[in-house]
Image: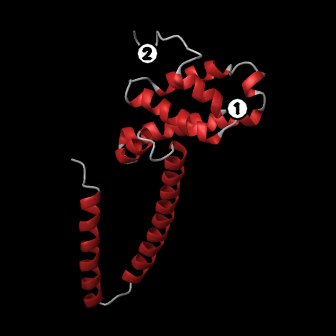
Amino acid sequence: MSTVDREPNASSPLARMAKDAVDNQSSARDWGREALRLIIEDGETVEGVITRTKQALGWHHMSGLLDTESKRSKFNNYFSTLRYLVAGWGCGSIPVSKRDDVLSDRASFLYIYAHQKKLEKEEATGFDDAVECLTRVRAFAQDVSPATALRLKQEAALLLEVLNRKAPLRP
């Protein structure tokens, strides 16, 4: 039976965990692990898992489990987190070891997301700082002596060597 043909099952682990996660943060961790397991191990799509969760929660009915906008918002954040993590693992921007940590219950999908976002923010800040330094170096290079220019050129060559190891030029 294909993933698309599956009927939402109110007693499935995903459905039970989603219902528990409405009011319980530790259950959200379990729901995220099960959602990722279905995606990674069973080959379901992210959107398919999200749809199944919405069906289990009666998403389109503003009553019962999702009786407040804050609960719906919380699950929208969980859904965005799933999309972000799966895409990150797919393109290699997030280490697969982090995925394995979630699947083996060594880390929460929410923790991995928060940690990755923190790393991205630190990298963006570091990048901005590096560009600022390069701007100062470029300004400095305008007026240096030929001997200092040669030394600066050697330092720049070392920098390019490091960058080429990290991001080789494409053909």
Dividing the picture into quadrants, the one containing residue 141 is: bottom left
State which quarter of the image contains the N terminus.
top left
Question: In front here: 167 or 19?
Answer: 19
Lateral position of residue 84 relative to residue 27, left or right: left
Where residue 13 appears, as percent x and y from the top left, is 53, 24
| Label number found at residue 72 | 1
Lateral position of residue 53 relative to residue 100, left or right: right
Lateral position of residue 59 relative to residue 68, left or right: left
Q: Is residue 163 above or below residue 58?
A: below
Question: In front here: 123 or 108?
Answer: 108
Q: Secondary structure at mark 1?
A: helix
Where residue 98 appears, as percent x and y from the top left, is 40, 47
In the displayed orientation, state which residue is furthest to the left.
Answer: 171
Q: Secondary structure at mark 2?
A: loop
The scheme the figure's colours follow is: secondary structure
Identify residue for label 2. Answer: 3
Q: Crowding at label 1, few (<14), some or many (≥20) Cα neighbours within 10 Å?
A: some
Dividing the picture into quadrants, the one containing residue 15 is: top right
- Residue in the image at 64% along x and 27% along y: 19
Alpha carbons under labels 2 and 1: distance apart: 25 Å
Q: Amino acid at mark 1?
A: Arg
Q: Amino acid at mark 2?
A: Thr
- Residue in the image at 29% along x and 63% along y: 163
Where residue 44 appears, as percent x and y from the top left, is 43, 23
Question: In front here: 37 or 92?
Answer: 37
Q: Are marks 2 and 1 in contact (CB under 8 Å)?
A: no
| Label number found at residue 121 | none
Q: Is residue 162 above or below residue 47?
A: below
